[in-house]
Amino acid sequence: MSLSKIPYIRWAKEHAQDGEFSLAMSAVPPVDWSDLDLDPRDLALSEFSAYGDTAVREGIAAEWGWGRDRVFLGSSATHTHFCFAASLLEPGDRVLYERPGYLPLLDALSVLKVEATPFERRFEDAYALPQDELQRAVRAQGAKLVLLTDLHNPSGVRLAEAERRFLATLCEETGVEVIVDEMYRPFLDPDPGPACALHDGIVTIGGFNKVMGLSQIRIGWGISTPERIERARRILDATTIHNSCLTDQVARAAWRVRERLLERARTIAHHGWAVLGTWLESSPLEVVQPAGGLVCFPRVPAELFPTGAALAEAALAVGVNVTPGHFFGEPGHVRFGCGIPPEQLATALSRLSEVLRA
Ligand SMILES: Cc1ncc(COP(=O)(O)O)c(C=O)c1O
């Protein structure tokens, strides 16, 4: 049995909230019932939907002009990823994944005994997609699947339109499939829409977690072709049967006020970055400017701290929690989140200034 070798989720569950100020979060703060115009006393305990709430599936699909047969709902984005990947891959199949990246997606695949190889998104190239390298690796390895995030976690960089078109060409020319995790994409305004619109071999994953402030209801979605969705449902049937009916109802209410929740998320990101971006300009940390969202991934000068983990430890000693870069596969960095209220963020950052000065 292959057990998880990637420690990030365990750390995120047990330690991301440590410290007086947590800059370890990538999601907006949670919403409340009143934000959803929902009275919890109205929740039914016995609703049933075989493959997720119809109104939610229709809403997700209609936003981009499709029908609900193109939307899969799973028990989180993580589970949705797994259902699509597990229904495609056989033991020994080759998977390519980005590094730095959100490695838990890969971790889930380890139980399938696939062969996973990283390709580098480099700080020096502003984390651009290494198109030639990726294309060569797909061909040389006969890879069946490529895993990507857009916005990129941890850097917050977006895929340029030309990079998204490259992915479509890659699918067309090599037969590889691409799963793009687009949990953070709706932070962009205007939103360029899901990459799966560009080719049937691209699956887009989204969720209610990062932008809608509902990380605890555990629901995610995939947009793809009806055939791939049918395949992924074979894994869903076997791994969770169906989602919680309470989740279905909260998701339905949230979708009704989606525009409002999006506006809230973009406003939080805008105010947070105004503080964090300004602070970074006068700090010794070098950063690639994120396209949106709440996180960025600065490089820590080795003469100040040998690793991102060493800076994270010193920051925690003064009450500020940042995520060490090794969790994303790049130990010389730290991930900063800016989703806490701007006054608190400013206090946290002034403490970090002292740590960096010392
Ligand atoms: C890129 C990405 N995908 C998925 C997830 C997890 O989503 P969920 O909680 O819906 O499984 C995260 C959480 O950090 C993430 O950053």
Image (cartoon, grey):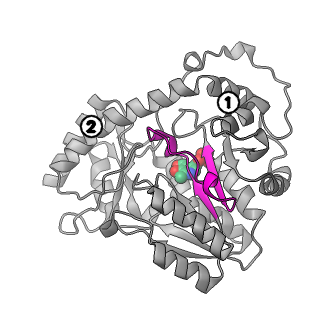
x then y, percent, for residue 84: 73, 58
Q: Nearer the viewer, residue 165 or 106?
A: 165
Side of 137 where 273 appears, left or right: left
x then y, percent, for residue 278: 21, 42
User: Where does the N terminus fall, quadrant-wise?
Assistant: bottom right
Instruction: Choose top left, top right, bottom left or bottom right for residue 297.
Output: bottom left
Q: Residue at x 34, y 38 (%)?
A: 21
Compared to residue 55, the image places residue 221 above or below, namely: below
Label 1 CB less than 8 angstroms from ligand 1: no
Side of 68 where 266 appears, left or right: left
Q: Residue at x 82, y 23 (%)?
A: 45
Residue linked to disc 1: 251
Residue linked to disc 2: 274
Asked whether 197 falls inside the magenta stretch, the response is yes
- Would residue 145 be visible to someone looking at this image? no
Q: Nearer the viewer, residue 304 or 97?
A: 97
Compared to residue 157, the image places residue 92 above or below, namely: below
Q: Nearer the viewer, residue 303 or 186?
A: 186
> Tag 1: Cα neighbours inside 10 Å, few (<14), some, or many (≥20)?
many
Side of 224 where 169 appears, left or right: left
Label 2 CB less than 8 angstroms from ligand 1: no
- Please tell me whether mark 1 sits on a helix, a strand or a loop: helix
Q: Which residues are magenta?
A: 178-206
Q: Residue at x 47, y 51 (%)?
A: 151
The numbered mark, 1 or 2, whose residue comes first in the sequence reads 1
Cα separation, mark 1 vs mark 2, equals 31 Å
- Please tell me whether mark 2 sits on a helix, a strand or a loop: helix
Kind of residue indicated by mark 2: Ala
Q: Nearer the viewer, residue 223 or 171?
A: 171
Asked whether 184 falls inside the magenta stretch, the response is yes
Instruction: Choose top left, top right, bottom left or bottom right for residue 175.
Output: bottom right
